[in-house]
Image (cartoon, rainbow, N blue to C red):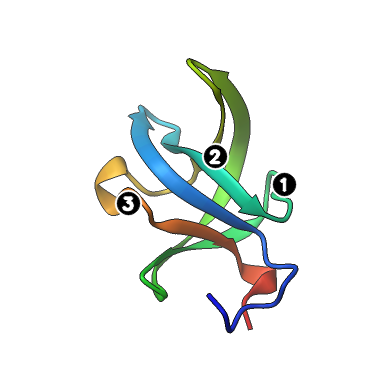
Amino acid sequence: MNDRNCDTAIFQITDAFNITDRGCVVAGELKHGIFRMGDKVIISRSGATILYTEIIGIEMFTHNTHSPSLLLRGITKNDVKKNDCVIGIADVG
């Protein structure tokens, strides 16, 4: 990710699950930046773009630690893997 702007919003996925009729929730760690509902984002794996989606919800779950989660439109948990990254499209260039 060295070629990315230092202001790029990056979220590293650690887990994912489906919510029927809503989308896919990805849990993980916010590495840098700010995400907002309605943001257009890409899912990136090893630096390659896997797919495009949109953030339709943001939650903070507290199991053992505080874990931010993003609800993504039009994808399933089978579309993402651990260590994939969610990256703000406006920040990709």
Q: Nearer the viewer, residue 73 or 7?
A: 7
Would residue 9 be found to the left or right of residue 42 on screen? right
Q: Examine the rendered structure and indicate whether residue 88 appears above or below residue 63.
A: below
What residue sits 54% from the left and 22% below the top?
65
Residue ranking furthest to the left: 78
What is the CA distance from the residue labelled 2 to the residue labelled 1? Answer: 10 Å
Instruction: Please state the horizontal and vertical placement of residue 9, each as a whole percent of the image.
Output: 66, 60
What residue sits 24% from the left and 46% below the top?
78
Q: Mark 2–mark 1 contact, CB under 8 Å?
A: no
Which quadrant: the C terminus? Answer: bottom right
Mark 1, Cα crowd under 10 Å, few <14 / some 14-19 / many 20+, is: few
What residue sits 39% from the left and 41% below the top?
14
Q: Which residue is mark 3?
A: 80
The kind of residue tagged 1 is: Arg
What is the CA distance from the residue labelled 3 to the residue labelled 2? Answer: 13 Å
Q: Nearer the viewer, residue 15 or 21?
A: 15
Q: Examine the rendered structure and indicate whether residue 57 appears above or below residue 32.
A: above
Q: Which residue is mark 2?
A: 70
Mark 2, Cα crowd under 10 Å, few <14 / some 14-19 / many 20+, is: many
What is the CA distance from the residue labelled 1 to the residue labelled 3? Answer: 20 Å
Q: Which residue is mark 1?
A: 36
Q: Earlier in the sequence, mark 2 or mark 1?
A: 1
Q: Examine the rendered structure and indicate whether residue 40 appears above or below residue 47.
A: above
The kind of residue tagged 3 is: Val
Q: Secondary structure at mark 3?
A: loop
Q: Secondary structure at mark 1?
A: loop
Would residue 50 be found to the left or right of residue 5 on screen? left
